[in-house]
Image: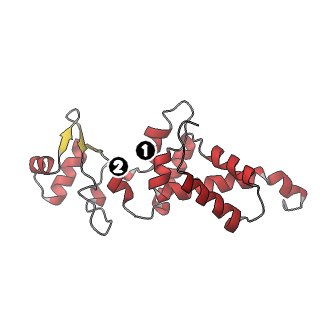
Amino acid sequence: MAEMFEPEFLAVIKGIILEKIIPGSFSAAQIDDALEKARIVNELDVVQLLQKQDTLCSKCGCCCRICTPIAIKKDELSQISNYLSYPLRKMRRDLNITTKNGQIFDMYQSPCFFLSKDNVCMVYSFRPFVCRGFPATHMITEGLEKSRPTVPAYLVVICKAVQAWYAQRVIGRLISSDLPSLKLHGYDK
């Protein structure tokens, strides 16, 4: 496996499954297998994350502190400038916003200038697409472009929404892998 998750995160997920969710139901080997299989993603997985990410997000602001540069389209930058009554040229200069191609700009500021001390986005209604779609947009650009698409480890480490989504995937795989034995015990009725 080329990219490894933080061992601490895997240990936490494994411990929660073993001790709290379904104690004694699965072996450590079964859990390890489910942890690995849950890392493999496809387009449908990313769509499901996109649908759930707002409810899973803890609003910790970690993505706003770590993910730089932030790609901003020209029209998004203009909307933010108008919303804040911050002249566009001055904003670009003050916030170190550089152009990629005249239509896309990069903002190299960490934490994001628009993140308040209360972890609230000051331009939430006008935030760039890359921010609106996080973490699913990063899953697309970082995870699906590989020959064997996997959940990017850094997303699991920094994003509580991805942690919750990944944990749900692991538990779902464990339960679905155990369905034949549940039928044997009469739990299929």
In front of the other: label 2 or label 1? 2
- Residue at 12 percent across and 56 percent down: it is 86
> Residue 8 placed where, x, y %?
55, 56
Q: In this view, does 147 lie above or below 178?
A: above
Q: What element carries label 2?
A: loop
Asked if residue 183 lies left or right of residue 83, the reply is right
**In this view, which residue lies farthest toward the front?**
7
Marks 2 and 1: CB-CB under 8 Å?
yes
Q: Which residue in the protein does label 2 denote?
A: 67
Q: Is mark 1 on a helix, strand or loop?
A: helix
- Rounded to the nearest angstrom, the CA distance separating label 2 from label 1 is 10 Å
Near-viewer residue (30 or 58):
30
Amino acid residing under circle 2:
Cys
Dot 2: few (<14), some (14–19), or many (≥20) neighbours within 10 Å? some
Assign the C terminus to one quadrant of the image: bottom right
> Residue 163 placed where, x, y %?
53, 56
Figure colour scheme: secondary structure
Amino acid residing under circle 1:
His
Asked if residue 73 lies left or right of residue 92, the reply is right
Q: Which residue in the protein does label 1 denote?
A: 138
